[in-house]
Amino acid sequence: MSAQPKPHYTPTEYLAFERESETKNEYFQGEIFAMSGASRAHNLLVTNLIMGFGNRLGDSCSVFPSDMRVHVAANGLYTYPDVSVVCGEEHYLDDAHLDTLLNPVVLVEVLSKTTAKDDRNSKFLLYKSIASLQHYVLVDSQRVNVALYSRGAGSSWLFEEYQGLDAILPVLALGIELPLAEIYRRLELPG
C-alpha cells in the first residue's frame, strides 16, 4: 500500500482557500498546515504584549494580533505570528485585501509545548530573511522567560534572554522597554 501524495497548492490557491476558511492555516512550500487553538496563558500573554506595545508606541507604529498574516517573500512562508509590529508605511501583498503584511519590524511568538521547537528553530530561520525585521521575540508560556533576537551588523543576529518579573525587555528598534511583570500580568508562572 502506498502513501497518498500530499496535495500541492500554489500561493494563489492557498490565499483563496485561506480567505474563505473559518480556521487559520499556514502555508510553506506548497503545503497548508492547520493551526491549533491557544491556551488561557497564551491568550493573556498576547493581550498583554499588544497592550504594552500599543500603549508605548501610540500612533507611530501599528501593532497587530495573530489575525494578521505575514508573508516572507524570500522563502514563500505565509504565517500568523502572535504579534506583529510595523512602523512607517505598511506594505501588503499587491492585492485589495490588506491582510498579508510584508514589512514587520518586530515579530513575537508565544511558545507552547507544541510550538516551542519550531518557533525557536525553523521559524526563526525563515523569519530572519525579512529585510525589515529588527527583533524576533519568543515569550515562554510555561515560565517567566523571554528570548530576544536582534539584528546585528550584516547578517548576524544577537541573542539575549530575560528571566523573572524584575527583568525589562529592551526593544531598541522601537525605542521602548517592556517590563516582564507587565508581559506576564495576571499569570502565576515560575521565574
Image (spheres, grey):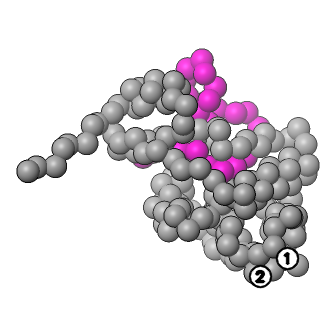
Label 2 secondary element: loop
Task: Say which residue appears at 86% left-offset and 54% top-offset.
Answer: 52
Q: Local crowd at mark 1 within 10 Å, few (<14), some, or many (≥20)?
A: some
Q: In the image, 1: left or right of 49?
A: left
Res 189 quadrant in image: bottom right
Q: Amino acid at mark 2?
A: Gly
Q: Is residue 10 above or below residue 54?
A: above
Q: Local crowd at mark 2 within 10 Å, few (<14), some, or many (≥20)?
A: few
Magenta part, dominant SS: loop
Q: In the image, 7: left or right of 81?
A: left
Q: CA distance from mark 1 to mark 2?
A: 7 Å
* Residue 165 visible in this rendered orientation of the protein: yes
- Which badge, 1 or 2, comes first in the chain's sequence? 1
Q: Is residue 3 above or below residue 25?
A: below
**Residue tagged by mark 2?**
191
Residue 82 shown in magenta: yes
Q: In the image, 106: left or right of 172?
A: left
Task: Say which residue appears at 86% left-offset and 64% top-offset.
Answer: 186
CB atoms at circles 1 and 2 under 8 Å apart? yes
**Residue tagged by mark 1?**
165
In terms of depth relative to the viewer, which is nearer, 124 or 130?
A: 124
Q: Name the spot of residue 68 as percent of width and height, x first.
A: 64, 38
Q: Is residue 49 above or below residue 24?
A: below
Task: Say which residue appears at 65% left-offset and 38% top-offset.
Answer: 67
Q: How many marks?
A: 2
Q: Quadrant of the C terminus?
A: bottom right
Q: Amino acid at mark 1?
A: Leu
Residue 87 shown in magenta: yes
| Magenta range | 75-102
* Residue 120 visible in this rendered orientation of the protein: no
